[in-house]
């Protein structure tokens, strides 16, 4: 009897444990593994080492160690890969691959099999301490760094919705402990179901908010402590995008084994992936009113820290790729895509760029590296990205000179001017000076372009009437002067631009004409002169909201024949200065002063003279960046 009772008890125990196992259900299996990876099963007291083909159940947690990697596959064919030094919890999941993963630290890469778009909600959710990610069917990579509380997302294919969320409790230890409770015996099954349902509901609600961003193929976004919502998606460096995408097993090399990529390749070679053009301004945005924040496009992602390193201020804009080209902010390994800081520096998750630890560095080298680190920390917006306070820094991004090259800009200048003609060296009329004031306007259009060259065009109209006494024997039939020009601006540095301008401007020149009877008459004739201006613009004082510049140039004036009056080729000079103030990000006001001086030799039948013409102008310019 005792034997039968023991047999029955063993049988009941086996049936109960088996049914318990089936009730939990295996939802995924390990399909690839490298290095040391441990698994904490639901209700387990200690972690065990993971082996290939091991099965996973809901509420299981995985931890990878240095240089280790694991890929799990769900029953629907979707896969999740975990990189080195990472930790996830399979918070909620069913056999159809619908559920929630909680990423506690590190990097996660996933390829999710798509679902019906008409179906409500997302098929797959990823939760970090600072962000919620909603996926229907796509391939993406996300990084969460608990040191700086940054969640970053890079989408390779498809679209991923991302919303910044607040998690309570907010400290690292208590958040981890709260998440792990779902896999322990501390909570009842009913309580766990309630918590997961509430978590799913809250994440879906966050992803429906107006502050959610949709990160498309080739784009990057992040959740930062000091920024109110997820950053606007931007396109990263296409060559790093290729390398990161090819690194499907999330391999990381030691610094001594990396192979630096050729950053110039980006100019000729784009990404093999389909990259969706970003909607955010490629130069970045920081709008304190709307809370929109985005860093400059075309930068690198550092997998280790989760930081995004945008191109430097002097970077060139690529018109066809719609990004800036990062060439002086570091590099990356061509095989893995991992970011490499400039020589002598390292990137810290909490401090940004700092000097690398080395004993062989002179005081001068240390000084140079500190200055380089300071510059790069400004590039990554350290005071915003790594700021711990919730309140965002109140600042607006104003365009630098190179960024303006890549933009369309329209301006109108209203000006008054003084026009002086010194008439001399004439054998038929006496010397004299004609001097009068006029007014007019000038419309200027700077065209958007890539690189460091920018086309520019203008139209102008002026009115001036000379006094009768000054005219003496000369007559003036018209008071209007028209002008137009086309040219190109070359960006040399943030303080220096060069300009070549071909213009057709009308001027007043004293001349004479003789009729058939031999009668000679004298008039102030309107003549259209073609000229080529070669000059430079130097910004001798600059800040975020204003600049002061000096302009200088040489004018090459072509010959011109107007009726029987011939104007010989000549040279001229132009000097100017201006003060520009940006009262909004896209709007400026500029006070400008310039002087043009030309000497013209004119000749006709029985008449010749030298005309020194000086025009000094003061104008108020209003401009807008489109």
Image (cartoon, rainbow, N blue to C red):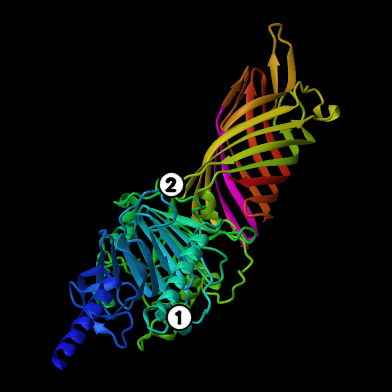
Q: Residue at x 47, y 68 (%)?
A: 199
Name which quarter of the figure residue 34 lies in.
Answer: bottom left
Q: For this rendering, which residue is in front, 421 or 503?
A: 503
Quadrant in which the C terminus is drawn: top right
**Residue 47 point in image, percent of width and height:** 28, 85
Left or right: residue 190 compared with residue 388? left
Q: Residue furthest top?
A: 517
Closer to the observer: label 2 or label 1? 1
Whichever of callouts 2 and 1 sits on the residue coming sooner in the sequence is: 1
Q: Residue at x 47, y 57 (%)?
A: 233
The percent position of residue 611, horizontal first and vertical second, equals 68, 33
Residue 248 falls left or right of residue 116: left
Instruction: State the SS at label 1.
Output: helix
Magenta-colored segment: predominant secondary structure: strand
* Mark pair 2, 1: CA separation: 48 Å
Disc tally is 2
Relative to 427, residue 398 above or below: below
Q: Which residues are magenta?
A: 531-559
* Structural crowding at the residue carrying mark 2, measured as other residues with C-alpha within 10 Å and reported as few (<14), some (14–19) or many (≥20): few
Q: Position of residue 312 (x, y in %)?
A: 46, 63
The magenta stretch spans residue 116: no
Pointer 2 residue: 319
Q: Position of residue 171 (x, y in %)?
A: 50, 82
Q: Residue at position x 62%, y 64% from top?
A: 395
Q: Is residue 517 left or right of residue 344?
A: right
Label 2 sits on a secondary structure element that is: loop
Residue 392, compared with residue 454, is above or below; it is below
411 vs 152: above or below: above
- Residue pointed to by mark 1: 178
* Residue at (68% x, 55% y) in the render: 581
Whether residue 310 can be seen here: no
């Amino acid at each position: 009897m005792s034997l039968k009772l023991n047999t029955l008890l063993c049988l009941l125990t086996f049936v109960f444990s088996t049914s318990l196992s089936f009730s939990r259900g295996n939802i995924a299996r390990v399909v690839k593994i490298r290095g040391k990876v441990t698994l904490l099963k639901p209700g387990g007291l200690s972690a065990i080492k993971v082996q290939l083909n091991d099965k996973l159940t809901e509420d299981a947690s995985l931890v990878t160690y240095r240089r280790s990697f694991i890929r799990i596959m769900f029953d629907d064919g979707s896969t999740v890969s975990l990189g080195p030094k990472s930790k996830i919890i399979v918070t909620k999941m069913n056999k159809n691959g619908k559920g929630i993963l909680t990423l506690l630290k590190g990097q996660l890469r996933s390829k999710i099999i798509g679902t019906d778009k008409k179906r409500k909600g997302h098929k797959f959710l990823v939760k970090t301490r600072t962000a919620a990610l909603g996926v229907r069917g796509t391939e993406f990579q996300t990084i969460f760094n608990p040191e700086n509380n940054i969640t970053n997302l890079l989408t390779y294919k498809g679209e991923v919705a991302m919303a910044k969320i607040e998690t309570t409790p907010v400290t690292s230890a208590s958040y981890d402990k709260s998440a792990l409770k779902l896999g322990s015996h501390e909570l009842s099954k009913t309580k766990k179901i309630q918590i997961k349902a509430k978590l799913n509901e809250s994440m879906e609600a966050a992803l429906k908010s107006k502050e959610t961003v949709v990160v498309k193929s080739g784009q990057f976004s992040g959740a930062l402590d000091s920024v109110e919502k997820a950053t606007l998606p931007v396109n990263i460096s296409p060559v790093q995008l290729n390398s990161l995408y090819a690194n499907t097993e999330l391999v990381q090399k030691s610094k001594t084994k990396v192979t630096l990529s050729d950053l110039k390749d980006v100019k000729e070679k784009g990404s093999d992936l389909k990259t969706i053009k970003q909607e955010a301004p490629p130069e970045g945005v920081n709008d304190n009113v709307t809370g929109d924040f985005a860093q400059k496009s075309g930068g690198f992602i550092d997998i280790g820290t989760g930081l995004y390193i945008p191109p430097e201020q002097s970077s060139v804009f690529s018109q066809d790729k719609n990004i800036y080209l990062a060439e002086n902010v570091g590099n990356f390994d061509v095989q893995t895509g991992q970011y490499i800081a400039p020589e002598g520096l390292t990137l810290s998750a909490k401090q940004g760029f700092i000097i690398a630890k080395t004993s062989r560095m002179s005081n001068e080298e240390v000084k140079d590296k500190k200055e380089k680190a300071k510059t790069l920390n400004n590039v990554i917006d350290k005071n915003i990205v790594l700021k711990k306070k919730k309140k965002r820094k109140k600042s607006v991004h104003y365009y630098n000179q190179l960024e303006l090259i890549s933009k369309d800009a329209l301006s109108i200048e209203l000006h008054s001017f003084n026009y002086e003609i010194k008439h001399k060296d004439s054998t038929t009329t006496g010397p004299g000076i004609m001097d009068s004031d006029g007014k007019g306007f000038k419309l200027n259009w700077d065209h958007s372009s890539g690189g460091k060259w920018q086309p520019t065009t203008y139209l102008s109209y002026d009115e001036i009437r000379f006094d009768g006494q000054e005219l003496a024997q000369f007559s003036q039939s018209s008071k209007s002067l028209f002008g137009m020009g086309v040219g190109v601006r070359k960006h040399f540095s943030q303080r220096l631009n060069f300009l070549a301008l071909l213009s057709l401007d009308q001027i007043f020149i004293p001349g004479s004409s003789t009729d058939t009877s031999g009668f000679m008459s004298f008039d102030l004739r309107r003549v259209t002169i073609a000229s080529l201006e070669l000059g430079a613009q130097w910004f001798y004082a600059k800040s975020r909201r204003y600049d002061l510049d000096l302009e200088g140039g040489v004018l090459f004036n072509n010959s011109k024949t107007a009726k029987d009056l011939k104007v010989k080729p000549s040279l001229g000079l132009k000097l100017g200065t201006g003060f520009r103030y940006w009262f909004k990000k896209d709007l400026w006001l500029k006070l400008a002063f310039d002087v043009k001086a030309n000497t013209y030799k004119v000749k006709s039948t029985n008449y010749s003279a030298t005309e020194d013409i000086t025009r000094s102008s003061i104008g108020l310019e209003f401009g807008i960046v489109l």
